[in-house]
Image: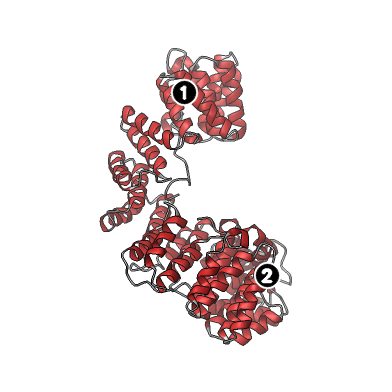
Amino acid sequence: MRGPTPFRFRRTAGAVFGLLVALAAPPLSAEPSPGAYLAARAALAAHDFPAARPLLAEALAADPAHPVLLEGSVVAALAEGDLDAAVEAARRLGEGGTRSHAAHLARLTRLARDGEWRRVLAALEAGRGVGALSGGLVRGWAWLGLGDEEAALSAFDELAAQDGLAAFGLTHKALALAALGDWAGAEAILTLPPGEGMQPSRRGLVALAQIMAEQGRPADGAAILSEGGGRGLDPALLDLRDRLAAGEAVSFDVARNPAEGFAEALYTVGAALGQGDPLSALLYARAALAIRPDHADAALLAARSLEALGQPALARAAFALVPPDDPAFLSAEIGRAESLRREGSGEAAAEILLALSRSHPGRADVQATLGDTLRTLGRHAEAEAAYDRALALYDAASPVRWFVLYTRAIARQAQDDWEGAEADLRAALALEPDQPQLLNHLGYSLVERGEKLDEALAMIERAVEAEPQNGAIVDSLGWAFFKLGRFEEAVEQLERAAALEPTDPVINDHLGDAYWKVGREREARFQWRRALSFGPEPEEAARIRLKLEGGLKAVGAGEAPAEEGREPAPVVGEGPNG
């Protein structure tokens, strides 16, 4: 299911990390410790929070009231989940009269954690809030904390009346009614159609299923998960659906009291910000966890935000916050393994996934992710076996089945099983006939093999039409023309590809070959030298050096050999686990 669009809140959240702009400016006061200041600025700009914190402390020892350093301390502490340190820096920042969204977020979070609801409301009234959405949500939960149900529900209604915020206000009003035991009232709101302001969200779907179970209708809850989540249910949703379908007792736990509701409000804002603003999403996720450490979705949000900020080690620590007995543990472990794989620790990732495949043999996503990891390690036969298991487990109509067929095809190609690879690619295209990476891969492979050339060229042209700015696909079209002997057309397309991907060694190499074939030998040598400068694979580099010495004839009868072509890479980020 697709959650609310975050763009409406980008301006509000942007103020949270405005410190990076401030840190780029000269110091605001005479700076007795410029080395520490500059090092802290660099660490914060790189989102290296563990490195930034001692440097900030060192710089503050020389200038204790420096507002930029103090705000940086708030952000760095909160980003690491150290709420008390963030609040202390926020207190010192406030004493100097500086207003900061990050500081307000830290102080409001601790007040809520400690049940200081009147002080939460007082801070909001004094303008120490964190934006319209956050303020509206936490105000409602603070009133509920004081026992004023009417004021709480009115606060959510006021938020729902604001342009673009209806779904947020309505969802939290429903959660508040559920926390009060009004199951029917909560369900009535959560089942409102989009035309009346309600939009489905993952957490809202969980709440609705649990509320149905609380009313003695677990089967309805299971059905709503299957219908609302489609076939892409994550492990936690699958676990909940299966428990409901089995008739197990399931209780409402999304927001059972005002403190949990407050944490849910913070998570809601962080999730809405999502990838568009990962630093703010991280701060809201950490704030939610400070109130409710068992909020698995907040831990996953923190981990994914840290990954987006380029902090894989911190991300893995956040994934590890999800305990083994939580249904979200599977997602967390898959995330941890993928983080290791992206960082180059493929063997460690494989060990995690192999353990998961033994403990969860019926999970298709585990098998598919294991296959991806084994394939990147060059263990193609093992990868193929993992993909076999995944495909046997996925429903025939699963929206990710095409991707697993695609990746199994790549593993089969690596084992010189072209018959099996082609069968997989055509089966994937039967499911996704317009998928440009599939069209490109099959078309390019056929061109390289000299088979079904008219069909292959048509496939690549369709791929280029779908993604005209994709340099790798445009390169495929140019290389297809080259292999067909249409060299002038090859030059035209390969020049386009080189403009789109100017530092790609394969594209520059291909362009050099095409220039050579049309008699532009000086330009060909220039392109081959460029290709060498961009770090091609060792075997490719050796062939390019041969061509620099003797032209295309040096690598085979005036034609570039098939192995000089590019093997199209699998889609990044579009698979079942990407």
Residue 563 pos. (x, y %) = 41, 25
**Can the viewer see residue 283?**
no
Specify the color scheme. Answer: secondary structure
Circle 2 sits on which residue?
132
Query: Which residue lies under the disc numbered 1?
Result: 456
**Distance of label 1 from label 2 (alpha carbons):** 54 Å
Q: How many marks?
A: 2
How far across and how far down the image is residue 556, in percent?
A: 42, 15
Please tell me the numbered disc located at residue 398. none
Residue type at tag 2 = Ala
Q: Relative to 574, does residue 203 appear above or below in the rendering? A: below
Judge the density around disc 2: few (<14), some (14-19), many (≥20) Cα neighbours within 10 Å: few
- Identity, as a three-letter code, of the amino acid under mark 1: Ala
Q: Which mark is first along the chain, 2 or 1? A: 2
Q: Which residue is located at x 51 percent, y 19 percent?
A: 482
Observer-nearest of 384 and 56? 384
Seen at 48% across and 75% down, the residue is 183
* Residue at 36% in and 35% down: 409
In this view, the residue in front, 5 or 123, is 5
Secondary structure of the residue carrying numbered label 2: helix
Q: Position of residue 560 (x, y in %)?
A: 46, 19
Dividing the picture into quarters, in which one does residue 219 lie?
A: bottom left
Callout 1 crowding tier (Cα within 10 Å): few <14, some 14–19, many ≥20: many
Compared to residue 396, the image places residue 162 above or below, namely: below
Residue projecting furthest to the left: 358
Within the image, what quadrant is residue 431 found in? top left
The structure residue drawn at horizontal position 47% and vertical position 67%, both measured from the top left corner, is: 208
The quadrant holding residue 468 is top right
**In this view of the protein, which residue sits in the foreground, 214 or 171?**
214
Give the percent coordinates (x, y) of residue 99. 70, 75
As drawn, is 49 to the left or to the right of 429? Answer: right
Does residue 112 show up? yes
